[in-house]
Amino acid sequence: MHILITGGTGTIGSRLTEHLLDYEHQVTVISRQRTRPPELPAKANFATWDGRSTTGWGQWVEQAEAIVNLAGAGLADARWTTQRKRLIRDSRVQAGQAVLAAIRAAKRKPNVLIQASAIGYYGSGEEIKTEASPPGHDFLADICQAWEASTALVESLGVRRVVMRTGIVLDPNGGAFPKMARPVQWFVGGPLGSGQQWLSWIHHWDMVAAIRFLIENESLSGAVNLTAPQPLRQRDFAKLLGLMLNRPAVMPVPALALKLILGEMVQVVLEGQQVLAERLPTAGFQFSYPEAWDALRDLVNPEWESD
């Protein structure tokens, strides 16, 4: 199967490219980078785009059976100024609109579009959220709703669409996990704020395996949560991480300090979510890392301890 990945040079896109190639799929990576990254596997095709139009890459759509749209500016890459918040939203919506335009223009349309989203869709709180839960009303929920809506019309073109609402992806190569592990390594880690907030997470292997499952499983469409079966409190996650790194993780980081450092972005770490994936297991997907203990044991290796 020929699969296009927009935003394919990011942490998850890179993992997904290697995973799909291992399973004998053909992969074309679409990226805003002007030149082919040296670390991109030789078997993968590469094309550039501007993130908001079909220029330079639209012709690839007619050759693809599936598209995975991962494009969007990182949530944790910079403080949430008004300008940054606009970029977070626009980068997602414009990329989705470009994907929609490319599919609409293609004479031969892909069978499926896998559209990225996040569990921020549900807002924060103590209650358990599933795919049937309504959206929240904060900034992240608004972003996710606009992100998902940007490609909704592909369904009217006869293309199966799956919206994957992803939890915190645990990956030592990027994203949230290195930021969570480093303070613990430096003996200054511990619960964030009260530590009572829920952390809904997924190991990077299960993330890319789930995406392949969604591509190949024609019975699935609509919203699908990508979170491990056992979310846990942030304080318990910090404790487990400390045990894995052989470091104490008992020094709490006050909420006020986090607000001063992170600004409005503090809601990502202080306002937890307890989100469960109901549809993936029902469809037959099996998690390789259902528990945080096993996931962290896989992630934390001697290289981490020597950093």
Image (cartoon, grey):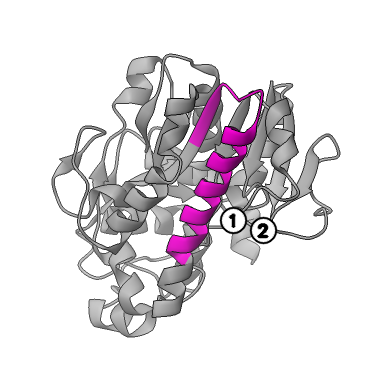
Question: What is the chief secondary structure element of the magenta stretch?
Answer: helix
Which residue position holds label 1?
Answer: 52
Residue 283: say if magenta.
no
Q: Residues within 10 Å of mark 2 (few under 14, many from 20)?
A: some
Q: Report the amino acid beneath label 2.
A: Asp
Residue 101: say if magenta.
yes
- Specify the quadrant that holds the N terminus: top right
Task: Give me the C-alpha separation between circle 2 and circle 1.
Answer: 6 Å
Which residue position holds label 2?
Answer: 50
- Specify the quadrant that holds the C terminus: bottom right
At 27% from the left and 35% from the top, the residue drawn is 276
Pointers 2 and 1 in contact (C-beta within 8 Å): yes
Tag of residue 210? none
Q: Report the amino acid beneath label 1.
A: Arg
Q: In front here: 223 or 243?
A: 223
Q: In front here: 200 or 161?
A: 161
Q: Is residue 160 visible in this depiction of the protein?
A: no
At 39% from the left and 32% from the top, the residue drawn is 290
**Image quadrant where residue 197 sits:** bottom left
User: Where is 22 relative to 80, above or below?
Assistant: above
- Specify start and end residues of the magenta stretch as a single range: 88-114
